[in-house]
Amino acid sequence: MDIMSSTDHTTTQSSIRGAGSGVLRFAGMVLILSALVGFLGQLLAIGQWRQVGYSFGLNRISDLGLTTCGMVQDLFFPRYACSPGYGWFNIGTIVSGVLLIIGALLLLTGLRRSPDRIRGGSAVAWLLLLSGAALIVTGAVPANVNAVLHDAAGVARAVLTWAAMALVWWAFRSWRRSGAEGPLPLVSGPAARATLVLLIVSVAGFLALVLAGLVEFAAGLVDRLTFDLLGLWTILLGTGLLGLPLTRAREQQRTDERRQLRRERAERDAAVRQAVEGLEQ
């Protein structure tokens, strides 16, 4: 009877683990799709740009969502914008935000179902959820409709995503300092290090945008370094979630190997002590 109970318990745990891993992988796919939809909306809008060609150096990302044609006068270099494909960009941005929220909710669900503890996972999910909401606002309110609200939502999205990136990096560093034991990070290895690089570059780009005079003739490029890298990191995070079961298995193997080495070392030390005590007698 005890054996049957133990078997049932193991089977149940395996089922829970499998269900949690499946949801986390699905969350990863949705996050990747979220970023790809956003980039696709940009490409479709750029393809329909009229008059003077779209300049990745001068034109900001938000120019693609402007619903009217004309000169844009803001903190940056005056430029002409005419984006007949603004619908593609704005709808793509909104859908991207919705998918980001769905991905965050799936991440929360997967974390609750998974018996494995993930460092900072729930906090990252909530930050992504709020970031998705801010992204929806940027798409629903083009800059020529309400520049203040559009820009505020864009900044909020950036800050929330930066916080998530910083938390992911912190979780990886804490995990490494603990000897790669305990709760796993959402991403590890090269992906975690890439997270730090993308975070630094994105924040630096934003600071350059704030100091508009430094990037007047390259506002578009710096704009992309600030905001497009957020989408790139979302893809990176999604890829990490897809590989989380493999990471778990690999780290479990390493943990078992470390325990075996410690056990063997303890046995050798005990044997040496016994030998020394035997000689002393």
Image: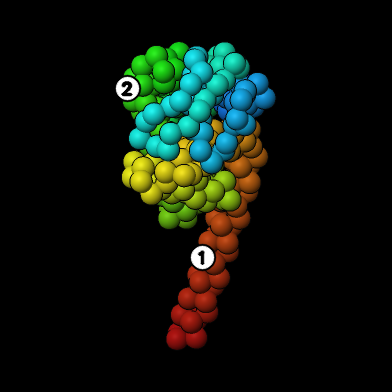
- The x and y percentages for residue 140 are 45, 13
Q: Residue shown at 52%/25% (left/top)? A: 81
Q: Residue at x 65, y 21 (%)?
A: 48
Q: Identity of the amino acid at label 1?
A: Ala
Q: In this view, does 216 lie above or below 137?
A: below
Q: Where is residue 277 in the image (x, y as percent from the top left)?
A: 46, 80
- Work out which quarter of the rendered image holds the N terminus and state it: top right
Q: How is the image coloured?
A: rainbow
Q: Mark 2 packing: few (<14 Cα in 10 Å), some, or many (20+)? A: few
Residue at the (62%, 31%) spot, across then down: 53
User: In terms of image quadrants, where is residue 19?
Assistant: top right
The residue under label 2 is 148
Q: Nearer the viewer, residue 58 or 175?
A: 58
Instruction: Give the numbered dot on residue 110.
Output: none
Quick one: SS at disc 1?
helix
Report whether residue 25 is seen.
no
